Each structure stands twice: as structure tokens, then as C-alpha cells.
Image: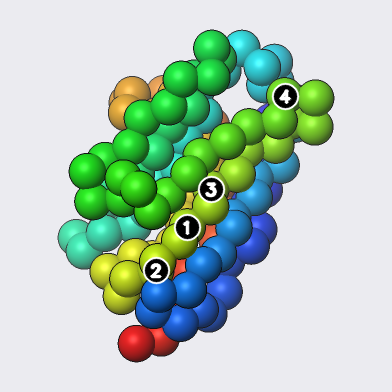
Amino acid sequence: VQLVESGGGLADAGGSLRLSCAASGFAFSTYAMGWARQVPGNMLEWVSGIYADGSTRYIDSVKGRFTISRDNAKKMVYLEIRNLKPEDASVYYCATDPWRPRTDSTYMGKGTRVTVSS
């Protein structure tokens, strides 16, 4: 199983970024996928999820600015970030089973860093 994130980098406050996640080694289309970010205290905060039926979920602080999408044929999941805020700066992780505890059968990538210049 592999989840490989890309698309992070430096962007200006108010700007946009598109994060991508390439998945392999599991039945991608049947999994809920999500994006989490690291927050102070070395904790992970789930910011968005997209389920097998295409339904989506966002935390309040990113609603209207973040859009999650998936392409099952390409085994890709995306996170479009608009109107970047300094507090969006973090390492973003792509993972299966958002908002569920990590177990041996849940997967997470190594992350991509987003830096916001204000």
C-alpha cells in the first residue's frame, strides 16, 4: 500500500494550492479518503474527507475554502486550497478512513508541507 502526496510548497496568503495524493495497493474506490494536517502538540487534525459514495465532509474552519475530490479511475485524491491563511501552514497527510482511529488496516502517506507567506 502506498499513498504519495504532492503539491505542497510556498504560497502567499490569499493564494491557492492543489494537493494531490496517488494511491496504490488497495481497493481505492471502496475506501473513504481524507486529508489531515499536523497541529501544535504533534497532533493530527482531520480537515476533509470524501467517501466511497462521493459525499464530502469538512471542518468548519476550511468550509468554502477547501475542496476535496477523487478520481477513482486514476486512484487519486485531491485537496484544493483557496484563500490560504497563515494558520493553514502545516504538513498535510493523505489517508484512508478519515476521522477513524489508526489501525493496521488504515493507511497514511508521508505528507506534503504547505507554507504560507503573509
Mark 1 belongs to which amino acid?
Answer: Ile
Mark 3 belongs to which amino acid?
Answer: Leu
Mark 2 belongs to which amino acid?
Answer: Leu
Question: 42 or 17: which is nearer to us?
Answer: 17
Residue at 34% across, 87% down? 118
Q: Please give the count of numbered marks on the rendered protein.
A: 4
Bin the neighbour count of mark 4 within 10 Å (Cα to Cα): few under 14, some 14-19, many 20 and up: some
Q: Is residue 35 left or right of residue 101?
A: right
Bin the neighbour count of mark 2 within 10 Å (Cα to Cα): few under 14, some 14-19, many 20 and up: many
Residue for badge 4: 72
Point out residue 98 in the picture as x, y percentages from the top left corner: 40, 29
Q: Could you give the CA–CA distance between mark 2 and mark 4, rounded to whole angstroms? A: 27 Å
Residue for badge 3: 79
Residue at 42% across, 49% down? 66
Q: Is residue 10 left or right of residue 24?
A: left
Quarter of the image with the N terminus in it: top right
